[in-house]
Image (tube, grey):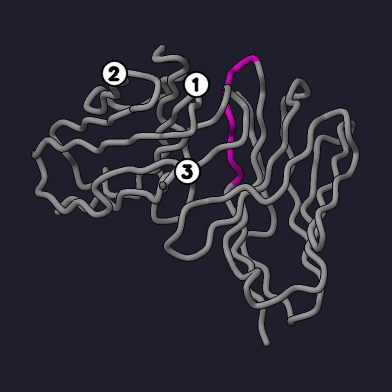
Amino acid sequence: GENVEQHPSTLSVQEGDSAVIKCTYSDSASNYFPWYKQELGKRPQLIIDIRSNVGEKKDQRIAVTLNKTAKHFSLHITETQPEDSAVYFCAVYTGGGNKLTFGTGTQLKVEL
Amino acid sequence: DTAVSQTPKYLVTQMGNDKSIKCEQNLGHDTMYWYKQDSKKFLKIMFSYNNKELIINETVPNRFSPKSPDKAHLNLHINSLELGDSAVYFCASSQDPGGKLFFGSGTQLSVL
């Protein structure tokens, strides 16, 4: 089955700095790559996603880049704010398995 | 007007008991899921139903049995609860397999 690795597991940045979280996957047939944010005690919520026919997607301060050849994709958050503090999960969808496989999560802490 | 609602929010029970968690979505989605989130925050899929048909059944003990009476509902029944079942269980739905997931607020299950 699909194997998704996510790094780092924890990330601490100063407010205003950028944060980058990276995920790698194993199945070259994977074609959908969403990112979910989970605040403490809350449900995961989709923040951005990308499909395999696109290399980059931006939404205000967040962006996702995809390198299909290397089988990795990254979440970029610029001008971080305290409310960005949360656990971020990458995920990979492989149509053959009808399954979204999540990464292990990154605890992001934005310090004042 | 919660899109995906699950009950109860908290469930505290003794080992060996049987319990159920209910989930309902009002988004008109065809696909529903159960995810388990352990103490390390790992999100692992347990089951997925598409149009009331089971399409994903991960390696989950037989003590866990999902039931989908219609497309808007997916319940989870757990027999003979064990200490290791303690976790947060999230229901989710999507328009189709691999689509954007909408999560319920989670059920914190504590087995004593």
Q: Residue at x 85, y 46 (%)?
A: A57
Task: Identify the residue at the far bottom of this view.
Answer: A112
Q: Are marks 3 and 2 on the same chain?
A: yes
Say what amino acid the circle numbered 1 marks: Asp
Residue tagged by mark 1?
B30
Residue tagged by mark 2?
B69
Q: Say few, some or many: other residues with alpha carbon within 10 Å of mark 2 (under 14 / 14 to 19 / 20 or more).
A: few
For the magenta stretch, what is the residue range?
A96-103
Q: What whole-number distance in Å separates the C-alpha atoms at marks 3 and 1?
A: 14 Å
Q: Are marks 3 and 1 on the same chain?
A: yes
Does the magenta portion include A100?
Answer: yes
**Where A82 sits versus A42, above or below?**
below
Q: Say few, some or many: other residues with alpha carbon within 10 Å of mark 3 (under 14 / 14 to 19 / 20 or more).
A: many
Residue tagged by mark 3?
B103
Mark 3 or 1: in front is: 1
Say what amino acid the circle numbered 3 marks: Phe
**On the rendered structure, is B67 left or right of A94?**
left
Q: Say few, some or many: other residues with alpha carbon within 10 Å of mark 1 (under 14 / 14 to 19 / 20 or more).
A: some
Which of the two residues, A70 or B25, is positioned nearer the viewer here?
B25
Q: Residue at x 73, y 42 (%)?
A: A49
